[in-house]
Image (spheres, rainbow, N blue to C red):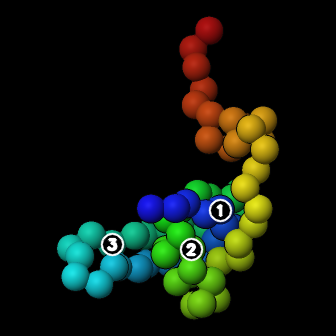
Amino acid sequence: MTMAWAIFNREFNWRRKRSVYSFNVKPSPEPQQRPRDVVDAAIAAGAAEEVPSPSREEKKAITGRKRAR
């Protein structure tokens, strides 16, 4: 499964066909990484805008966890 980055401008719920699992994405001004089919469905519904994959440093700042010192 390929992943894609997008900025979600509203809450988005989506379920794959023949699957009991669904995706619930909350809106955020920060890019979020989600499976390609979820991002494609969100773009088609007008709930997201695809953005290019961030650089390694940008990705660390977005997804990096805060560690105790």
Reading the image, the residue beneath label 2 is: 39
Q: Amino acid at mark 3?
A: Ser
Residue 22 marker: 3
Q: Are marks 1 and 2 in contact (CB under 8 Å)?
A: yes
Q: Residue at x 53, y 70 (%)?
A: 36
- The answer for how far apart the CA atoms under marks 1 and 3 are is 18 Å
Reading the image, the residue beneath label 1 is: 5
Q: In the displayed structure, does residue 59 sit left or right of residue 40?
A: right
The mark closer to the camera, 2 or 3, is 2
Can the viewer see residue 11? no
- The answer for how far apart the CA atoms under marks 1 and 2 are is 8 Å
Q: Quadrant of residue 65?
A: top right
The mark closer to the camera, 1 or 3, is 1
Q: Amino acid at mark 1?
A: Trp
Q: Quadrant of the C terminus?
A: top right
Q: Residue at x 70, y 42 (%)?
A: 59
Q: Amino acid at mark 2?
A: Val
Relative to the observer, which residue lies in front, 69 or 43?
Answer: 43
Residue located farthest toward the top when viewing the structure as drawn: 69
Q: Is 68 above or below relative to 28?
A: above
| First of labels 2, 3 by sequence position | 3
Q: SS for tag 1?
A: strand
- The answer for how far apart the CA atoms under marks 2 and 3 are is 13 Å
